[in-house]
Image (cartoon, helix red, strand yellow):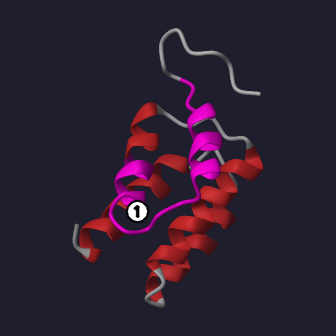
Amino acid sequence: MKIADIEKNINLLAHSLSGKIEQWRIDFAMEYIGHGESKLAFETLCEYICEANADISLEDFEVILAISYSGYELHPLLLIYLAKLVGDVPNSPPAP
């Protein structure tokens, strides 16, 4: 995946997080893209999701996985935690 595509996915994720985490946090993370630090933007957004215990959709998680598998790897434990925040998976146990 090209960097432009990765940045597009990060923007999609950020847009989807609006209303789930504070907007100033999203804006802060997205500023990293303007400085050529798209990986840091992605990592920061993921950390904010975890800190807020924000419900994310399955689509959000799929975007996170796509970005992570494109070379912006997240720690496996962080991915597991994010997976537990997915709120729209049928027959899944509730998040902690």
- Quarter holding the N terminus? bottom left
Q: Residues within 10 Å of mark 1 (few under 14, many from 20)?
A: some
Q: Which residues are magenta?
A: 63-87
The residue under label 1 is which amino acid type?
Asn
Q: Nearer the viewer, residue 56 or 27?
A: 56
Q: Quadrant of residue 9?
A: bottom left
Give the residue at the far front of this rendering: 76
Residue projecting furthest to the bottom: 35
Where residue 95 sits in the image (x, y, percent)? 70, 26
The question of residue 86 being in magenta is answered with yes
Query: Who's the residue at 55% across and 76% down the image?
Result: 40
- Residue 45 lies in quadrant: bottom right
Q: Position of residue 36 (x, y in %)?
A: 43, 88
Q: Is residue 73 left or right of residue 56?
A: left
Task: Name which residue lies at 57% across and 25% down.
Answer: 87
Q: Main secondary structure of the magenta part?
A: helix
Residue 17's place in the image compared with 31, above or below, is above
Query: At 63% across and 51% down in the image, what residue appears?
Result: 78
Q: Is residue 58 above or below residue 41?
A: above
Q: Residue at x 39, y 42 (%)?
A: 62
Q: Measured from the top left, where is residue 8 in percent x and y?
A: 31, 65
Instruction: Report how many numbered discs are placed on residues in the image.
Output: 1
**Quarter of the view holding residue 70:** bottom left
Q: Is residue 96 magenta?
A: no
Secondary structure at badge 1 equals helix
Residue at mark 1:
11
Image quarter in which the C terminus is found: top right
